[in-house]
Amino acid sequence: MNPPPNPARVIVLGGGLSGLLAAWHLQRKGLDPEVWEASAAVGGWAQTLSWAGPKGEPGFLERGPQGLLLRHGSALDRLIHELELELRPTRPKGPRWLGKAGQRHPSPASLAGLLGAPGLSLGGKLRLLAEPFIPAGTDADESLHAFFARRLGAGFARECLPALVAGVLAAPPERLGLGALPRLRHLEARGGLLLGGLRLGAERTRLPQGGTGALAWALAARLCVHTNRPVRTLEALPGGRWRVLGEGRSSDADAVVVALPSAAAADLLRPTSAEAACLLSAIPRLDLRVWHSRHPMVQGWERGLGLLVHPPEGRGLLGAVSFAAGDPRGVADLLQLRAYVGGAYPVDPALASWPGVFTELRRWLPELGEAIQVREEAAPGAFPLLEPGHGARVARIIKGLPPNLHWLGTERFGPGIPDLAEGIKAWVQSLRM
Ligand SMILES: Cc1cc2nc3c(=O)[nH]c(=O)nc-3n(C[C@H](O)[C@H](O)[C@H](O)COP(=O)(O)OP(=O)(O)OC[C@H]3O[C@@H](n4cnc5c(N)ncnc54)[C@H](O)[C@@H]3O)c2cc1C
């Protein structure tokens, strides 16, 4: 019997979730992937970092997502099961608010909040009911604003949407295309936001034991990953193979997957794929400032709170969210809050430091006591701004790449981890190697 042929060797550049997900699916396809990560830790933005409490108690914060949005049967849900990651049981959530017109109101992300949304006229509320009868759109370049105005009416798009989108994507809905929320296309294809949502099934935010960073650790534990190994250049070899060069080392592969932030990907690709590099470097990235703080617990907020601020009323503050009491990442008896500032919105100079952020938070959350601990985690370039028409740019980037050189990440599949999981799984399945 002949020995099985050697599996194709693939070097995946970047050990964030995009690179790890790609390597995981490539390995399951029978290929031989190896991940190169520049920093000392895997996970990129999706890391759970240690942040000891005021008396040195164990405590943590999330660099990126605080929980994972799971829908039964989705690629992310299946992955969590394959990795045998234990999830904490879902508990009822605490209050969710929209800060608007100087006051807080129930969040329009719930039905009650939607019907009582500030600024939405009776006509605007009745218009919401027509949503299931609106036909699917055909404009590939539609903005999120245009999509929601078409499906839920101009009133919703004007009064409710800006806060909902700013709180998730840190940018105005007029500047974002459907590529920023690929889920919307699926929902529309299944009958709209309401019917499509019912058909696809409920989505719930779930927390893996150990925080959301546990996803990256679980993947890395099953893969060949090298940390502290930045890639510097790529060289094309005869026969469509590639040489990857890092600091003082090089390695050859049958294929390379670039799963780096767009600026780093552009620098790497410039010598071999000038047009793709130029297109990649033209994708705007948004800088976020994220403030983590611990305060005395407030009665009624034990199950966690969520606040979205209607821009520009927050002067740059986009929203805040807290852990539920008993969350294993927090410290007993303290409220652990995370506030987001900036993104595509101008920040009032007063909000450049914690006292200004706290004053703004207190405008919406007057019950909030003085912080016992504060830590800023700047997130430069954290989110890509996927503008209307971005899909055509993605198609040109892919077309501009030489054989066996692949590119993926948030700019291709959307910034949400469920979208990355879905997109990367489908991409590996379609790969002919
Ligand atoms: C504050 C915040 C909140 C978020 N909240 C949510 C949320 O609630 N839900 C959600 O779904 N998503 C959320 N996200 C988005 C999500 O975390 C990201 O979209 C996702 O983690 C991106 O993964 P990535 O691998 O594509 O990129 P990255 O995480 O940026 O990973 C890229 C990796 O490449 C490495 N690298 C860079 N240069 C080199 C080099 N030269 N050689 C080798 N490696 C290199 C980096 O060190 C990094 O590890 C949030 C993000 C942030 C910042």
Image (cartoon, rainbow, N blue to C red):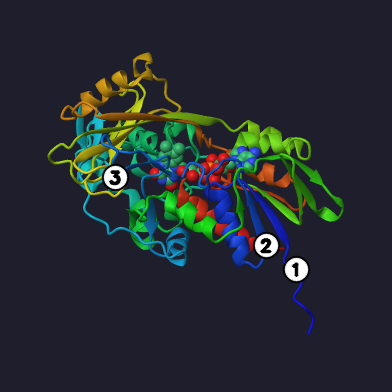
Q: Residues within 10 Å of mark 3 (few under 14, many from 20)?
A: some
Residue at (47, 66) in percent of width and height? 82
In the image, is residue 381 above or below residue 305?
above
Image quarter of residue 365: top left
Query: Residue type at mark 2?
Result: Asp
Query: 320 or 297, which is in the foreground?
Result: 297
Residue at (68, 46) in percent of width and height? 398
Q: Residues within 10 Å of mark 2 (few under 14, many from 20)?
A: many
Circles 2 and 1: CB atoms closer than 8 Å: yes
**Dot 2: what SS?**
strand
Query: 143 or 211, which is in the foreground?
Result: 211
In the image, is residue 419 above or below residue 174?
below
Which percent across, then down, holds residue 120?
24, 34
- Disc on the earlier residue, 1 or 3: 1
Circle nearer the viewer, 2 or 3 = 2
- Disc on the earlier residue, 2 or 3: 2
Q: Would residue 229 be seen by someone viewing this image from the given angle?
A: yes
3D distance between C-alphas at marks 2 and 3: 50 Å
Image quarter of residue 313: top left
In the image, is residue 259 above or below residue 117?
below
Furthest toward the bottom, the residue is 1
- Disc on the earlier residue, 2 or 1: 1
Q: Which residue was labeled with disc 3?
A: 128
Q: Would residue 140 be seen by someone viewing this image from the given angle?
A: no
